[in-house]
Amino acid sequence: MDSFKQRLLASPFDLTRPTNETALPNYSLPGAPPAETTAPPEVSFQMKSRTDPDFWSAPGQETTEEGKDGAGLLSNETLSALKKRIHEKYLKDADVAVVSRLSRETLTEQVRVQMELVLDAENLALTQKMRDVLVEAVVDEILGLGPIESLLADPEVTEVMVNGPKQIYVEKKGKLILTDTTFEDDTHVLRIIERIVAPLGRRIDESSPMVDARLKDGSRVNAIIPPLAVKGPSITIRKFSKIPYQIEDMIRFGTLTQKMATFLEACVNGRMNIIVSGGTGSGKTTTLGVLSSYIPEGERIVTIEDAAELQLRQPHVVTLETRPANLEGKGEITIRHLVKNSLRMRPDRIVIGEVRGGEALDMLQAMNTGHDGSLATLHANSPRDVMARLETMVLMAGTELPVRAIREQIASAVQLIVHQSRLRDGSRRITHITEVQKMEGDVIVLQDIFHFEWIGMDENGKVIGEMKPTGLRPLFLPALMAQGISLPQDIFL
C-alpha cells in the first residue's frame, strides 16, 4: 500500500566537491622513489531544470519510474511539515466560509497555486507527479478525511481501522493488512473525527467519548477517544458499496451455490420469515440486501436500521433510521421504537438491519400477526445459537414470559435461518440454510436443508469445502407449492 511518504521524492543531498584537498602522507619505503600523490577526483554534476523528472539523479544514473516511487524518500516529519505549511498558508489567505462551498476542482487549483508559492519560497523542487500527490493530500485534508481518504477510495478496501495515529489497518478480500499510512498525532485524528460527526449534529468529547455516525456515501463510522481508547483516538469505517451486490456476484464469490440461490428466492417469494445470522464481518447485511431484492415490486417495504445501508431497488420502500440521544440525553429513538411504529405504517414486509435487544419480541409478534415475509439479521455463532439469542433478547424486553412460551413464539414466527461465516482464508460462505420446524417437548427442532462440508486447506491457505444439500425437504414445501411456487426436484439432491 503506497503511503503519502512513498509517493514523494526527497530533497537533494548537498553533494559538493570536498574543500580539503591535502595530499596524503608518503608512506613509501626508504630508498624508494617518492609515491605520486593525487587529489581526490573531482565530482561534477550537471544542472537540470527543477521540473525535470531526473532532477535528483547524478550523471550516469537514470531515474526510472520505480526509482521515483522508491528512492530518496522524505522522512515522515519533513513530509508532514511541508504539507502542513501549505495547508496553513492556504487557510490563512482564504475565506473559510467560501472554501467550504468550493468544488473539489476549484479548491485543487487554488491549493496548487499556494503550493508553488511555498516551494519557490523554500527553494524546493518536486517533479510534477510529486506535486500532484502533494496537492491531493492537502485537498483531502481540507475537504476529505485526511490520510485515510485514499484508503476509502480504494475499491478493494472494505473496512478501514485506525487504532491510533500511527497504526492503520484495512480489510482487503477478507484479510486484515497493516498500512504505512499514518496521522500526524492524536490531535490530527480528533480533527478528522470532528469533521465526520459535526455535520450530523453529534459531538465527541470526554463526557461523550463514543459516537456512531454515517458518511455521505452511507459508510458506517464508529469513533472512540481517550480516556476510553488508551492508545489514542480510534476510528472504524465499514465502507458502503456504491453498487449493491446481486445474487450472481455472491455465486461468483463462492458465498453460495445456484441451488441455494434458487431455494432462497422461492422462500422470499413465498413470504417465509427469514433470519440471517453470523459473526461480525461475516457479510450478513450484504446477504440481507440480496435476499431483499427478491421481494416483489408491488409490495410496501419498511426497512429499519441503525445506519441506513440497505439499497433496495423496489419503488415502494420506506427507510427508517435510529437516532441517538441529544446533548441533554433526550430524544433517543431505538430500533424497538421504529419496529413498533412500522406496524402502523401498513407494511407488507419489515426488514430489520440488526436485532440486538428487546425489539426481538416486537419482531416476533409482527411475524405472528400477518407480517409474513419479514427479514432480519442478528449476531450468532450457529443456527442453534440463534434460538438461544432470540430467547435472551425477548427477555431483555422486560416481559416475564415462561421460556416455553417464548420458544413457541419463535418456532411459529421464524421459518428459516441463513447462517453465514467468515472462514480462515477470509472468504465469506453461507454455511447453513436451516429450517425451524416445530416444538418437541421444550426444544425447538431445527433441520439443515443445505450445509457447508469442510474438507481442509490447500497449500495456499484457501479453504477447501463444498456446499451441499442434505437431501431433506423442508416441511413448508407444500405451502410454497400452494402459492404456485415450484422448485426443481433435484434441488435437494
Image (tube, grey):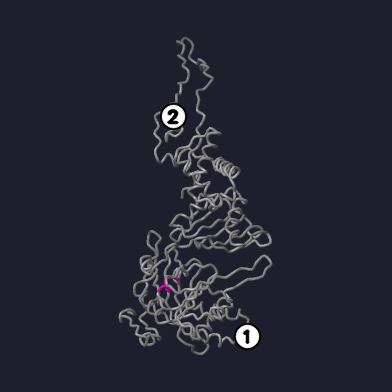
First to last magenta residue range = 289-293
Query: What SS does tag 2 mark?
Result: loop
The numbered disc on residue 455 is none
The answer to which quarter of the image holds residue 469 is bottom left
> What residue is drawn where x is 42% and y is 39%?
67
| The C terminus lies in quadrant | bottom left
Secondary structure mostly seen in magenta is helix
Left or right: 193 as drawn, with respect to 313: right
* Tally of marks: 2
> What residue is drawn where x is 45% and y is 24%?
44
Point out residue 43 in the picture as x, y percentages from the top left corner.
45, 24
Query: What SS does tag 1 mark?
Result: loop
Mark 1 is on which residue type?
Glu
Mark 2 is on which residue type?
Lys
Residue assigned mark 2: 48
Point out residue 25 in the picture as x, y percentages from the top left corner.
52, 16
The numbered disc on residue 400 is 1
Point out residue 204 in the picture as x, y percentages from the top left corner.
64, 60
